Amino acid sequence: MTRANLFLGGAVLFGAVALLTRTRAAARDDTLAPFAVVAPAGDSLRSADLAGRVVLVNVWASWCAPCREELPALDALAARYDASRVTFVALSDDVDGAAAREFLAVFRGMPHLRVGLGLGRLKERYRYPGLPFTMLVDPAGRIVRTWYGFGGPPQLAAIDSSIRRMAPGAQSH
């Protein structure tokens, strides 16, 4: 018996990551759940405003150590794309908006990311197993790929490659 499996009366229980990765796409709703959040400056950020674009949605929190490494890397990647065709969204799931704002101040606001404050309501909506959690969404609003955790340069290369396939010519020059 492994740590991931526990037998109880013939039933097999899997951890959340195992369940999420073993679920067939046809059995899940693969459409991005709509969101409407407040941006750090007080304006609004709505998923409806991003329709028709490739969107990378990253869920993070100020207390998440891998997020501190991933967000600046995503910001650098976002700078390579035409924001009218490919939008990078960073949704903080900090309960305290001030903590998220302080985190962003350390990184000079992440100028190439559209940032929103989820205020602790995102896990229920996106059912992620932990942070950081990233979803790549096609122009029709379907989630085509997800990443849990931060996998460093190989993950960034996979994100970049996937975006280039979905939005050829969207890289800014």
Image (cartoon, rainbow, N blue to C red):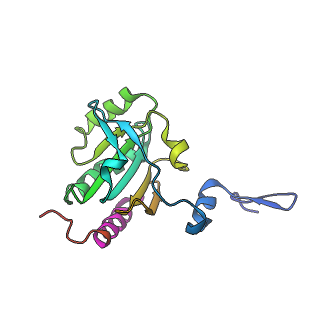
Asked whether 86 or 146 is in front, the reply is 86
Pick the quarter of the image with the C terminus.
bottom left
- In the image, residue 136 above or below residue 161: above
Asked whether 85 or 63 is in front, the reply is 85
Asked whether 55 or 97 is in front, the reply is 55
How far across and down, in percent of the image, does residue 1 sit?
Answer: 77, 63
Q: Which residue lies at the image location 43% right of the left edge and 62% below the top edge? A: 142
Corner quadrant of residue 100: top left
Instruction: Please state if 37 lies on the left or on the right of 72 as rendered.
Output: right
- In the image, residue 110 above or below residue 13: above
The stretch in magenta equals: 150-165
Q: Which residue lies at the image location 22% right of the left edge and 48% below the top edge? A: 112
- In the image, residue 7 above or below residue 95: below
How far across and down, in percent of the image, does residue 122 sit?
Answer: 48, 41
How far across and down, in percent of the image, does residue 74 sit?
Answer: 30, 53
Corner quadrant of residue 40: top left
Q: Does the magenta run of residues contain 33?
A: no
